[in-house]
Image (cartoon, grey):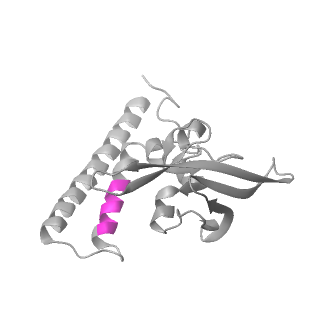
C-alpha cells in the first residue's frame, strides 16, 4: 500500500505565501481605501526589494498600474481595475472585499501569479499549510505558540491565558512528536 510518491503533493509548488499578493485587510488598516488615495505597494524577499505596484482608489474600485515582463523579454505596462465591495459586520462597521476580475468571487487577497491579479482559487494556489504533513503542521503550531509566549514581541497576558497557552504548547509538542513517530513507523513498514 502506498509507494514512492503516493503521499501528499510535493511542497515545491507555488503557494499564496510565496506569491505577490494585494491584501485588502492591510490596505484598510493603513487607511488607504478612501476614494482619491493613490500610492505604491512594495514587496520584499529576504529583506531585499522584489517589486512594487502603483494603485489608485476610486469610489467603487481599485486601479492597479504595474509593469510585467513577458517570458523574460520585453516589459509590458498593465492597468487592471478591480471592483470593491462591502458587507456589513454584525456589530457595526463594514468589511471590504475585492471582487475577483475573473470569477466575480469576493476575496480579501489578490494574487499576482501571472500577468494579472486574480483570487487564489483562479490560480489554484494553496496555502503553505495545506502542503504540510501532520508533523509539519504540528511544528508550525508549536513554533507559533512559543513565539506568542516567549518571543521578543510577546505581550502581557492574564495568568489564565498564559496557563491555557502553555497547555496548548504541551499538546502541540506531543502532537509533533506523535506525528514524527507515525511517519517513521510508515517509513519502517515500507522498508521491512
Q: Does the magenta portion include 8? A: no
Q: Residue furthest top?
A: 1
Q: Secondary structure of the magenta portion, mostly?
A: helix
Q: Residue furthest front?
A: 59
Give the vertical position of 40 relative to 105 (above or below).
Answer: below
Q: Is residue 7 left or right of residue 173?
A: right
Q: Residue furthest left?
A: 160
Q: Residue furthest right?
A: 74
Q: Nearer the viewer, residue 186 or 138?
A: 138
For the C terminus, the image quarter is top left
**Number of disc labels:** 0
Residue 10 appears in view: no
Q: Nearer the viewer, residue 79 or 156?
A: 79
Q: Provide residue 104's location: percent of width, then percent of height.
A: 55, 37
**Residue at image x 49%, y 69%?**
30
**Residue at image x 44%, y 47%?**
129
* Residue bounds of the magenta highlight: 140-148
Q: Does the magenta portion include 142? A: yes
For the N terminus, the image quarter is top left
Residue 12: which quarter of the image? top right
Q: Nearer the viewer, residue 19 or 95?
A: 95
Q: Provide residue 9's location: percent of width, then percent of height.
A: 52, 36
Residue 53 appears in view: yes
**Residue at image x 60%, y 67%?**
37
Give the vertical position of 43 relative to 152 (above or below).
Answer: above
Q: Provide residue 42's location: percent of width, then percent of height.
A: 63, 66
**Residue at image x 31%, y 67%?**
148
Q: Provide residue 74's location: percent of width, then percent of height.
A: 87, 53
Amino acid at each position: 500500500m502506498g509507494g514512492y510518491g503516493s503521499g501528499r503533493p510535493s511542497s515545491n509548488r507555488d503557494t499564496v505565501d510565496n506569491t505577490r499578493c494585494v491584501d485588502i485587510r492591510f490596505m484598510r488598516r493603513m487607511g488607504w481605501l478612501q476614494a482619491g488615495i493613490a500610492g505604491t505597494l512594495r514587496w520584499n524577499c529576504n529583506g531585499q526589494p522584489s517589486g512594487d505596484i502603483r494603485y489608485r482608489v476610486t469610489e467603487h474600485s481599485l486601479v492597479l498600474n504595474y509593469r510585467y515582463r513577458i517570458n523574460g523579454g520585453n516589459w509590458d505596462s498593465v492597468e487592471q481595475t478591480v471592483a470593491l465591495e462591502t458587507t456589513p459586520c454584525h456589530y457595526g462597521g463594514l468589511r471590504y472585499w475585492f471582487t475577483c476580475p475573473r470569477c466575480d468571487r469576493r476575496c480579501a487577497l489578490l494574487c499576482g501569479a501571472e500577468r494579472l491579479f486574480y483570487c487564489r482559487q483562479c490560480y489554484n494556489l494553496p496555502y503553505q499549510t495545506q502542503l504540510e504533513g501532520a508533523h509539519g503542521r504540528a511544528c508550525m503550531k508549536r513554533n507559533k505558540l512559543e513565539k506568542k509566549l516567549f518571543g521578543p514581541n510577546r505581550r502581557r497576558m492574564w495568568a489564565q491565558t498564559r496557563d491555557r497557552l502553555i497547555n496548548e504548547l504541551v499538546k502541540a509538542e506531543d502532537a509533533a512528536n506523535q506525528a514524527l513517530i507515525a511517519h517513521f513507523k510508515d517509513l519502517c513498514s515500507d522498508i521491512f
